[in-house]
Structure formats: structure tokens, C-alpha cells
Image (cartoon, rainbow, N blue to C red):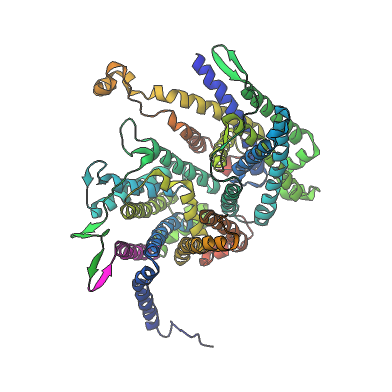
Amino acid sequence: MDIFLQQVINGLTLGSVYAVVALGYTMVYGIIQLINFAHGEVVMIGAMVAFSVITALAGAGLPPLALVLLGVGCAVPVCMLVGYAMERLAYRPLRRAPRLAPLITAIGVSIILQHLAMLVWTRNVIAFPQIIQTEIYTLAGATVTSVQLAIVALCVTMMAGLAWLVYRTRLGTAMRATAQNPQVAGLMGVDINRVIAATFVIGAALAAVAGVMVGTYYGIAQYTMGSILGLKAFAAAVLGGIGNIPGAMVGGVLLGIVEALGAGYIGDLTDLCQYGWLAGLLAEHCAEGGHFILFGSNYQDVFAFVVLILVLVFRPSGLLGERVGDRA
Amino acid sequence: MRPLFDTRSNPALVWAGVALAALALLWLPFALAQVGTSWVRIANYAILYALLALGLNIVVGFAGLLDLGYVAFYAVGAYTYALLASPHFGLHLPFWVVLPIGALVAALFGVLLGAPTLKLRGDYLAIVTLGFGEIVRIFLNNLSRPVNLTNGPQGIARIDPFSLGGVDFSQPQAFLGLALSGPIKYYYLLLAVLVAILVINVRLQNSRIGRAWEAVREDEIAARAMGINTTHLKLLAFAMGATFGGVAGGMFSAIQGFISPESFVLVESIMVVAMVVLGGMGNIWGVILGALLLSFVPEILRWTVEPLQRALLGRMIVEPEVIRMLIFGLALVLVMRFRPAGLLPSAVRKRELTDDRAA
């Protein structure tokens, strides 16, 4: 039971990060039907900038929390700028092009950002400074760290803030109107270009914070960290129903838990020695409590893709999506 | 004004041109060998990429299905060859047995990927194929336990080179008074395969199947209304593209002598996509041009940028590998921005991509 709870806690932590990144995908997709392939790289840049700031100021004698806040405070504007530049230079000129054109551009942008980051921060794995003293709490046999609690709390706050922005403010109304029908929204006086740019910038800001959280959680950062994280977050967005903001939140958390539980249990489930007749066949491996494990936890990264493919094949509109069925 | 080379009134000129090109291609490896044997190898890899790009062009260019996991089929072909012709399992089948098997297995994977994803459209399909490519790579990395199938991240070494009638393609040899090194022999072999696949592609494009693919790409619903079995055709496109990927993979295995999952990462898929996009989706000659450009230009830069930086700045700041990747990224962005149909656009694509209406 405690292992189960532990996996759920780990999954919840990572899942809420996926959710925040997935929001960036889903908002952009909802408005201009573009899979912003480069979104994961924005997460990476956020982590890298925060890393640089924190290491540079580590000797200044500031309290750890102030350091982290400064790191985030620098990462967010940089990422917002990257998000804006990306939209303005690469995607806006292609607004009226066929659907595959901006996707190909997005792949190019992703490669460019990744390798520019490599120029700045080298190709090595960077150890993220562990400045926050991690407290460990025990809960019904499972452990929770203060970092995990902070990540979940921060993610929930950001999601609530975004929900408020989208559903309660003028900008949010403009965003939803643009998502429904850009032409008509334009006729109603919405400055479409500004709204789309704002969507990119907001998504990038969320991604920056997510990047810092991932860096702190794993303790490492590298220029390639964005692509796999981005793909998983995209899978989460699809799981929840792409274009759907609550869906991205649900999908992210769910994907995190599926991944953690999957990685935790797949080894036990595919240990062929526990199945009577197979154990007989594999007697030489299974003797004396031996194991014959088909798939171990090293297949963790497969789960997100399997979930992605299953959702797209069986329920392309996702868990909460309703009007997007025709898009898949 | 009459054009300088009026091929219509004088068809012999076409054949003269083909003969000239053939001579130049036959002579090329010796010229490159003068500069350095490594350039012959670079030419070989360029041809290998041209093979891959031609295969991907069937899926992306002809049928209009963006496949971002194409390297998976390359990997399947390469690993099939490596497992059947290396000391790993102690099997040493001849290449003319293994290559078709590899192509077949790759085609099977193509159908395996195609079948569940056929109803997906455009960008969704792209992401699913990307996921498929990653899954294949993760499996290659981990299938060393509990039964050692792929030898995991260490990869498979000492793969048999091609040999035919006692002629070993990895060894130098004298032939008709010419000293043929290993890479030069592989160059001719690759060139022969390229020409064969080129002919298949040209014939395919204007065949009934090729035109049906074009119809599916332009408007799937209209194509279906015209009596085209779109499901079969898309599957066929996937299978055919995969087959060529598998052949290229097998040849890569033999030439390289060593493969590991490192060679089949996502970036490889994207590189092949960049070649197809840069050259011009759907145009066979454009795709080959794209493959050659994106293979040779980074290498030329590699040879100029490093000494230049050392001379000007005293040390190396920008690694050639980074420049290579930046070129790929920029090629994708700039082509889509300024010349969406590619350097050598196919006639249909040009019409389609300059159209305002979303596809």
C-alpha cells in the first residue's frame, strides 16, 4: 500500500508539472490549431536561465527562497520574450498556410532553440543547485518532500490563476472568442494578433516556471531535457482533449500518475515467473525466487506515447474535449 | 528564341546528358579520393540519406502523410541486418538474403504503424509517428534483458560487410588497373541502389497508384468518392516508404559495421524530413537535391569553420556539429517561410502551397 501511495505522490508531482506545460500546448492549439513543437524547449530555457541566475548569485548571501524567486523572476521574462519572438518571426507569417507548414516550422524552431541553448550552456548535464533544504514528511508509510509539496501547490495556484484569466478577464474573453472564430472575433474589434501573441507569452511564462520546477525536482538540467518533457506534456494535452483548458490540467495529472504507477508496477506484472505454466517453461530462470522480467521500469518513457496513441485512436477528442472530434 | 538545348526537337540530347551525368558520377569517387578518403565516405552517407529521403518522400510527398518517426524503419532494417549477419547470434547470412528480409520486416512495421493511425489527420499523425519512432528506439535500448536481443545501448558490432562471389566490399582491391578502396566500392553499390530506387520512384509517381496518392493528398473525401480505396493506398504508402527505409538501414549496417540505438534518434528523422522539405516535397529530383545539400554543406562547413575560428579567434567557439543542426533548423523555418514548396517544387505542390485556402 505504501508503495502504491508513494507512486501516486510522485506521479501527482510530475503530473502537475505536465499539466502546466500541457496548458501551453492546449492554449496555442485552441487558438490557431498549431502544435507548438518548440514549447518543450521554452521549458528547458526557463530551467537553464534560472540555473544561471541562481549559480551566479549563490555567493551573494541571499536567503535560498529569495534566490529561487530571483531565478524564476529572470526565467519568466526571458521565456516570454522567446515565446513572443517565436510567434512573431516564425508562426505569424504562416498563419494562412496549410496546416503542415507551421508544424514543420515548429520543428525547425525547436532544433534552433535547442542548439542555441547548447551553445550557451554546453552539452553537459548541469547539476541544478540544491539550495532549498528538503524536508521529508511521512504520510501513511509514504514520504513527501517539501519540494514536492511546493511544486503541487505552485502548479495548482498557476492553474487557478490561468483559469481566472481565461474565464474572468477581458483578455480571456478575447482569447476564447478568437479560438471560436478568428474572423468574427476580429470583426467584433478583437485585435487577433495581440491575442495570439498574448497566448504564446502566457504559455511561455507557465513553461518557464515549470522548467524551474523540473530542474529543482530532478536536480539536473540539460539542453535536451525539453523535447521529451514537451512530448509528454503534449500527450497529456491530447489525453485531456486538446484545445480544452480544464482537460489539459486533468490530462497532465492523470498522465503523471499513469506513468508513475506504470513504471512502478510493470516489472512485477511482466515477471513471467509468477504465472504458473510459464514459470514451468522458464524453470532455470525462476528457480530459487529468480525473476524473468519482460519489461522493467526502464520502459517508463514508453507510457506517455502509448497513452497518446491509444487516446488518438480510440477517443481523439480526449477525455473532456467535445467540439474537437473533427480535428483529429 | 529557341532554347539552347531544345530537347523536344532533338531527343538525343537527353541521352547525351544522361551519359554525361553517369560518367561524372562514375568518376566522382576518384576525384573525391584525391581530396581525402573521408570525402568518399561522406558521399556514401549522402547517397544513403538520398535513399532515406526518397523513401520518406513517398509517405510525405506523394501521399501527404507527415511521418516524424521515419528513422524507426531505418532502425528496423539496420537491426534486422545486424542480427542476421553478425557474431551476435552467430548468424552470417549473405546480404542478398538479409536485405530483402530487412525490407520486409520494415514494411511490416510500416503497416503496423499505419493501420491504427490511418484515420488521424495531418499534425496528429505527425506526433503519433514521432511517438512510434521513440518507442522503437526505447525498445532497442532495453531489449537486452531478459533475453539479449539487441545488446542494448552497447549496440551490435562486427557486422558482416557486403560480399559477393568472394569480393569483400570492405577490402581494397585492384580492378582493371584501378585501385578500388572499400568506400569506393560501396559508393558504386550505393549508386546502383539509388538508381534502382530512383527508377521505381519515377515510375511510381506517374502510375495509377501515384496519381491515386496525389488525389488522396489533395482531398481525401473527393478521392474516396472517385472510388479510390484510401485506406489501402495510405497503408501502401507507409509500407513502401518503410521498405526503402529498411533497405537503407541494412546498407547502413553493412557499411558502418556497428550500430547502436544512438544512430536512430529523433533528430535523424527530422534531418530526413528537412531534406525532403528543403528539396521540395513530392519532387523526386528536389528531394535528392535536398539530401545532397544537407549532407555536403555541413561537411564543407565543418572543414572551413573550425580552421577559420582558430585563425580569427584563436579557439573554437561554435562546434561544427552545432552549426550542422542550426542549418537543419534554419532550413526548415526559412523554407516554410519563403519557399514553402521547396527549392525544386513539384508542379502540384506549388499550386497547393501558394493557395490561400488551408489544406
Residue A141 in sight in this render:
yes
Q: Position of residue A187 (x, y in %)?
A: 78, 50
Compared across the picture, whether B339 is left or right of A84 comes to left
Q: Position of residue B268 (x, y in %)?
A: 46, 51
- What's the residue at 70%, 53% (across, down)? A88
* Quarter placement of the C terminus of chain A: top right
Which region shows up in magenta?
B176-204
Among all residues in the image, which is located at the extreme left? Answer: B165
In the image, residue A276 sits, relative to residue B2, either above or below, namely above
Looking at the image, which is closer to me, A67 or A37? A67
- What's the residue at 49%, 60% (across, down)? B302
Looking at the image, which is closer to me, A246 or B272? B272
Compared across the picture, whether A232 is left or right of A131 comes to left
Hey, which quadrant is residue B316 in on the image?
A: bottom right
In the image, residue B248 sits, relative to residue A209, either above or below, namely below
Hey, which quadrant is residue B32 in on the image?
A: bottom left
Q: Residue B187 colored magenta?
A: yes
In the image, residue A306 sits, relative to residue B301, either above or below, namely above
Q: Position of residue A147 (x, y in %)?
A: 63, 24
Compared across the picture, whether A169 is left or right of B215 comes to right
Q: Position of residue A314 (x, y in %)?
A: 49, 35
Residue B207 in sight in this render:
no
Among all residues in the image, which is located at the extreme top? Answer: A140
Among all residues in the image, which is located at the extreme front? Answer: B314
Hey, which quadrant is residue A141 in on the image?
A: top right
Q: Residue B172 colored magenta?
A: no
In the image, residue B48 sits, relative to residue B84, either above or below, namely below
Looking at the image, which is closer to me, A264 or B187? B187
